[in-house]
Image: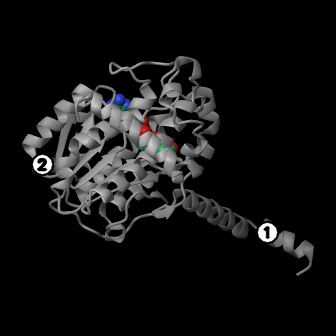
């Protein structure tokens, strides 16, 4: 075919339209990311999912319930979360295995109350998904416990909750702790708690990156401590969900009405849905393929390399030591 014939061929609407549709379908599928489709069941397992009133956490809670687990949804807003439970039940979840508990990662006392009640209700915990998060808060806020809000919601709060639930995790035949991390941990400039909790070092994205970096390092530190203590039945891993269209970005410029309107057609193509973003978390919670794997960072249902600071043993010891002091101050 000469080039004129070629052009005419591609200009033909019966060729052009299917080609465009195939192209868009291919791009969409690529951005959707890896789907965890193995039919693994987790009947009888007990799970706790933080921040399950929205986005990725809601989808993780839904899928763990569908696969047979009893899921404790640890959320901060009762009214909103009750509506979410109604919605999940409408979608086919088993209501008797969806239990709402109110707790705020930015209030250690509420986490303590949750843990104490959980201990009365359940002998063991099989799956803990530490997922709650805030990003890009417009200004520096200190929590009731004295930490910068992003630092506590993403990092310190989850450390405290994990350590309070460790006895129940150890009582499980095989327990998994899963953290929802972020690729933005690569941009964490420091893990210094002094800097993280100091207003003059505050920026819109920096606190989030620092907190996710500290959390990713804590995962390595905790995995090592469990191995040193010969705890072989509890693993801990962290994952990046991808770029997901959720309310997380509500305080960023992307969600300003005009910008959001302009970006929405492109965003629909390149952002994952919350269920797509939940896939690696569900994989880590359910798949026998990751049994025994611990201290690792996952993306697209695969182990991958985290930022170099996470692999720096001295820095991991430093941040892990910091968490020991926080816990000691709380008598844990
Ligand atoms: N979306 C993305 O592109 C993306 C990318 C990388 C990583 N992630 C990570 O994915 C996870 C889930 O985020 P998402 O995108 O699903 O966001 P989301 O829809 O905003 O969900 C965040 C959840 O955390 C809860 N939460 C926030 N602060 C809390 C606190 N102090 N105590 C208790 N719960 C609290 C929120 O509760 P309310 O409903 O009451 O607000 C909500 O349920 C986060 O760890 C996030 O860092 C997301």
* Horizontal and vertical percent position of residue 133: 41, 36
Where disc 1 sits, the SS reads helix
Kindly identify the residue that appears in the image at 91 percent across and 72 percent down. 4
The quadrant the C terminus occupies is: top left
Read off the residue under disc 1: 10
Kindly identify the residue that appears in the image at 54 percent across and 59 percent down. 305
Instruction: Write down which quadrant ligand 1 falls in.
Output: top left
Kindly identify the residue that appears in the image at 38 percent across and 68 percent down. 37
Q: Quadrant of residue 327?
A: top left
Q: Give the side of residue 222 with respect to residue 18, left or right.
A: left
Read off the residue under disc 2: 96
For marks 1 and 2, give the CA distance.
57 Å
Q: Quadrant of residue 154?
A: top left
The residue nearer to you, when weighing 21 against 235, is 235
* Horizontal and vertical percent position of residue 259: 63, 31
The residue nearer to you, when weighing 132 against 167, is 167
Q: Is mark 1 within 8 Å of ligand 1?
A: no
Q: Residue 244: in sight, yes or no?
A: no
Extreme left residue here? 120
Where disc 2 sits, the SS reads helix
Q: Give the side of residue 205 with respect to residue 331, left or right.
A: right
Q: Given contact means CB atoms under 8 Å apart, are the residues at marks 1 and 2 in contact?
A: no
- Of mark 1 and mark 2, the one earlier in the sequence is 1
Q: Give the side of residue 45 with respect to residue 52, left or right.
A: left
Q: Is mark 2 within 8 Å of ligand 1?
A: no
Q: Residue 298: in sight, yes or no?
A: yes
Kindly identify the residue that appears in the image at 37 percent across and 37 percent down. 323
In the rendering, which numbered label is found on residue 263? none
* Horizontal and vertical percent position of residue 153: 39, 32
């Amino acid at each position: 075919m000469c080039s004129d014939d070629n052009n005419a061929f591609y200009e033909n609407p019966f060729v052009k339209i299917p080609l465009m549709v195939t192209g868009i379908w291919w791009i969409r599928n690529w951005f959707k990311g890896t789907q965890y489709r193995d039919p693994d069941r987790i009947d009888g397992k007990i799970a706790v999912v933080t921040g399950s009133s929205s986005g990725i956490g809601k989808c993780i809670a839904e899928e763990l319930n569908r696969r047979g687990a009893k899921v404790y949804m640890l959320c901060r807003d009762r009214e909103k979360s009750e509506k979410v439970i109604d919605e999940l039940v409408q979608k086919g979840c088993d209501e008797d295995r969806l239990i709402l508990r109110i707790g705020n990662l930015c209030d250690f006392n509420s986490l303590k109350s949750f843990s104490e009640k959980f201990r009365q209700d359940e002998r063991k915990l099989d799956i803990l998904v530490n997922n709650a998060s805030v990003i890009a808060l417009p200004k520096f806020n200190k929590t009731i416990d004295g930490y910068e809000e992003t630092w506590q919601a993403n990092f310190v709060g989850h450390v405290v909750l994990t350590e309070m639930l460790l006895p129940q995790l150890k009582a499980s035949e095989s327990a998994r702790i899963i953290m929802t991390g972020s690729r933005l941990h690569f941009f964490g400039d420091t893990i210094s708690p002094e800097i993280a909790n100091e207003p003059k070092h505050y920026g819109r994205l920096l606190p989030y990156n620092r907190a996710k970096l500290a959390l990713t390092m804590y995962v390595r530190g905790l995995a090592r401590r469990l191995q040193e203590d010969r705890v072989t039945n509890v693993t801990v891993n962290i994952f990046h969900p991808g770029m997901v269209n959720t309310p997380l970005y509500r305080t960023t410029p992307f969600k300003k009405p005009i910008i959001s309107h302009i970006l929405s057609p492109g965003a629909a193509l390149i952002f994952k849905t919350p269920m797509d973003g939940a896939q690696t978390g569900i994989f880590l919670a359910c798949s026998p393929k990751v049994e025994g794997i611990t201290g690792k960072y996952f993306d697209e249902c695969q182990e991958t390399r985290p930022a170099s600071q996470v692999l720096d043993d001295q820095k991991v010891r430093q941040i892990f030591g910091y968490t020991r002091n926080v816990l000691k101050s709380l008598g844990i």
